Image (cartoon, helix red, strand yellow):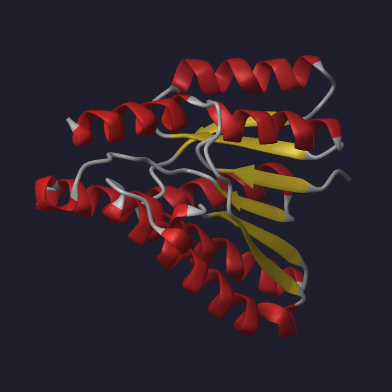
């Protein structure tokens, strides 16, 4: 039986590339999405045409009920979860003084709380399996900060702390927890971040 990977935010950008990578590695792939159903289903279909098991599942990672439903669907289909990649995220760059309460909450809820919720739900499955690997997509901004990225950097720094703590808790269950810290990538979100930072300087 193929190993199973859930990739959140996999309808575009880095998530879509990761879906292809794990498909090539003979994983069964869950293409998670929140809004872009058409694109997510196109990706899943392309993976199936390449000979992989793949399904697109809608779930807002910041809502526990939707994450639980996604995990239940995966277990009903394949019976296990071997890898979780917490890739779903958003950026809404602005200078600190111009960042609204709503914008701050949206970034923290999606990027940090969403990662926490997915980890909490999937950890229960992996602990019972006594095997699994969680990979959280943080950012170099979470270490060094970046002008016009106070909320985004805070969310990504939080992911680093969450990752290190979870790794110490879950090692006894043979569950590895790691974080990846990309710099700027040529994705839609990366491009929008550059535009927003340039606009904030004006």
> Is any atom of residue 64 visible in this view?
no
As drawn, 76 above or below 172: above
Horizontal and vertical percent position of residue 174: 77, 76
> Is any atom of residue 121 visible in this view?
yes
Nearest the eye: 80 or 154: 154
The residue drawn where x is 63% and y is 76% is 167
The residue drawn where x is 70% and y is 37% is 29
Nearest the eye: 80 or 82: 82
As drawn, 64 above or below 191: below
The residue drawn where x is 29% and y is 49% is 107
Count of marks overlaid on the render: 0
Which of the image's four quarters has the N terminus?
A: top right
As drawn, 150 above or below 54: below
Horizontal and vertical percent position of residue 180: 62, 55
Nearest the eye: 171 or 94: 94
56 sits to left or right of 114: right
Q: In which quarter of the image is residue 50?
A: top right
């Amino acid at each position: 039986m193929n190993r199973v990977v859930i990739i959140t935010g996999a309808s575009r950008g880095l998530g879509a590339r990761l879906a292809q990578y794990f498909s090539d590695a003979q994983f069964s792939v869950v293409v998670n999405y929140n809004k872009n159903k058409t694109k997510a289903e196109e990706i899943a279909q392309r993976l199936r045409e390449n000979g992989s098991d793949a399904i697109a599942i809608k779930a807002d990672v910041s809502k526990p009920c939707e994450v639980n439903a996604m995990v239940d669907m995966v277990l009903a289909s394949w019976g296990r979860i071997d890898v979780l990649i917490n890739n779903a995220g958003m950026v809404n760059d602005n200078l600190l003084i111009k960042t609204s309460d709503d914008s701050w909450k949206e970034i923290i809820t999606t990027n940090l709380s969403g990662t926490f919720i997915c980890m909490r739900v999937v950890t229960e499955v992996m602990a019972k399996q006594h095997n699994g690997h969680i990979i959280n997509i943080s950012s170099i901004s979470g270490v060094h900060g970046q002008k016009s990225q106070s909320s985004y950097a805070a969310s990504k720094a939080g992911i680093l702390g969450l990752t290190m703590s979870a790794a110490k808790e879950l090692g006894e269950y043979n569950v590895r927890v790691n974080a990846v810290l990309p710099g700027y990538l040529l994705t839609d979100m990366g491009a929008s971040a550059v535009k927003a930072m340039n606009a904030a300087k004006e």
